């Protein structure tokens, strides 16, 4: 039985690793989730992972996806460039900032930090002229932003946005 938002960290990693090498179609069909092929969008690929792999129902909650573990799930594409290097296909949006309240916080007490300080990131290879459902999960990692070399830049970027909000 799927636990939805109530997995422990070890379970999240185990399940995420089990998806590596599988297409979104395989993951979706294994759970018999119905989704019309013509309605597959980039957001719905993440929805397939949430619903089919973990049993998380679509929600607009401001908490991390996995409440008990305090982990937010992100599913994001990358592409192979013409010179055979790899790059992000698009930016990975971590959070929408509520400009009416978030400016009152410091970085480490912000809603952003509460929701995103631990991220389970799953990557898939985007291939042109291929059905989105046939894209395959290729990698996963649990990222603790406290231990990330990028934390200083993320904090600096957050304050840049907050200072713009404060300036009107």
Image (cartoon, rainbow, N blue to C red):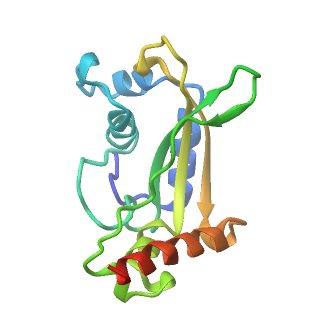
In front: 50, or 12?
A: 50
108 on left or right of 104: right
Q: Residue at x 34, y 46 (%)?
A: 2
In front: 162, or 144?
A: 162
Across and down, in percent, residue 35 comes to 24, 24
Looking at the picture, does residue 107 appear above or below residue 14? below
Q: Quadrant of residue 112?
A: bottom left
Across and down, in percent, residue 151 comes to 64, 70
Across and down, in percent, residue 84 comes to 75, 23
Looking at the picture, does residue 162 appear above or below residue 134? below
Across and down, in percent, residue 78 comes to 59, 34
Q: Quadrant of residue 111?
A: bottom left
Q: Residue at x 26, y 62 (%)?
A: 61
In front: 17, or 115?
A: 115
84 on left or right of 26: right
Count of numbered tags: 0
Farthest-out residue, top: 129
The quadrant of the rendering that contains the N terminus is top left
Farthest-out residue, front: 167
Looking at the picture, does residue 100 appear above or below residue 12? below
The quadrant of the rendering that contains the C terminus is bottom left
Looking at the picture, does residue 22 appear above or below residue 48? above
């Amino acid at each position: 039985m799927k636990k939805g938002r109530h997995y422990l960290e070890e379970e999240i990693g185990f399940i995420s690793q089990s998806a590596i090498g599988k297409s979104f179609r395989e993951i979706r069909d294994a759970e018999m989730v119905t989704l019309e092929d013509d309605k597959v969008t980039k957001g719905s690929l993440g929805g397939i992972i949430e619903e089919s792999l973990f049993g998380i129902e679509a929600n607009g909650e401001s908490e991390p996806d996995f409440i008990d573990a305090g982990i937010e799930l992100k599913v994001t594409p990358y592409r192979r460039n013409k010179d055979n290097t790899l790059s992000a296909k698009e930016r990975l949006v971590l959070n929408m900032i509520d400009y009416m309240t978030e400016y009152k916080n410091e970085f480490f007490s912000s809603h952003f930090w509460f929701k995103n300080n631990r991220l389970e990131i799953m990557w898939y290879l985007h291939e042109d002229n291929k059905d989105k459902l046939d894209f395959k999960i290729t990698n996963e990692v649990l990222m603790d932003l406290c231990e990330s070399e990028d934390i200083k830049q993320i904090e600096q970027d957050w304050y840049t946005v907050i200072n713009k909000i404060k300036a009107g």
